[in-house]
Image: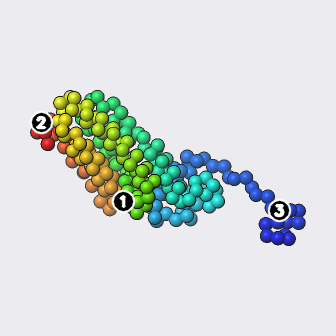
Amino acid sequence: MTEEGQSEAGPAKRGRPRKFDRDEVLGRLMVLFWAQGYEDTSHADIRAASGLSGSSLDRAFGTKLELFITVLEHYHQATAPIVAPLADPSAGLAVIDGWLDIVDDALASEPSPSGCLVVSTITQPIAEDARVAQRAQDYLGRLSDALRSVLEHAVALGEVPEDAVERRLALLMGGYIGFLTAAGSPLGTSAARAMVAGLKETIGLWMGVDDGA
């Protein structure tokens, strides 16, 4: 070698960038950030989980923050089935009751990681970044819009007073954030499922004798 990076035959040739399955890598990194949080995930962790070199990661995703934003977008797409049970709101409150059964089944399966990547992210300092905050808002807004549509149909069915839609939407969203926060905390899935059961009882009251609360 006559100089660093060169031989007598000339400069060393760079290899082609390594090809990889983008969705597969994002799926592994999604689980990593979900389990450890943004701040506690190091570049070494990211390289190990992705199986890629730092340079390959930089070329594909940019900085750690830019990578995390891409992971949040991937999570948003991967969790589309969460709102699927709410897609036909015409049955009113029964749709939400059934949706909570699906949520409870998901909690009972003891997923790893538990809880929700977005819900855990909004409690971390990284949520102060405007781009991260926007992705979280998009995620929660998708569910909020679906629940609002169901509640508005429930008004037409006489199950919900028109002036109670905003209060009940706030309760449902608060409950969703609450039981997913509990699932990802030391309280664990048993507490989260108890919260789901409590919310189902409340919906049962809405579907029965309605005092307009």
Q: Quadrant of the N terminus?
A: bottom right
Report helix, strand or loop for mark 3: strand
Give percent across and percent down for residue 119.
37, 53
- Which residue has dot 1 on it? 123
Please identify the quarter of the rendering in which residue 51 is found. Answer: bottom right
How is the protein colored in the picture? rainbow
Report helix, strand or loop for mark 2: loop
Confirm whether residue 26 shows in the render: yes
- For this view, does 146 lie left or right of residue 59? left
Give percent across and percent down for residue 68.
50, 55
Q: CA distance from mark 3 to mark 2?
A: 81 Å
Q: Amino acid at mark 2?
A: Val
Name the disc covering residue 142, or none. none
Badge 3 or badge 2: first in the primary sequence = 3
Q: Amino acid at mark 1?
A: Thr
- For this view, does 75 lie left or right of residue 158? right
Q: Quadrant of the C terminus?
A: top left
Q: Are marks 1 and 3 in contact (CB under 8 Å)?
A: no
* Front position in the image: 131 or 104: 131
Give percent across and percent down for residue 172.
26, 45
Residue at (66, 49) in percent of width and height: 19
- Which residue has dot 2 on it? 209
Q: Residues within 10 Å of mark 2 (few under 14, many from 20)?
A: few
Q: Give the vertical position of 155 relative to 73 (above or below).
A: above
Residue at (31, 56) in percent of width and height: 182
Q: Amino acid at mark 3?
A: Pro
Q: Residue furthest right?
A: 9
Mark 3 or 2, closer to the camera? 3
Badge 1 or badge 3: first in the primary sequence = 3
- Which residue has dot 3 on it? 11
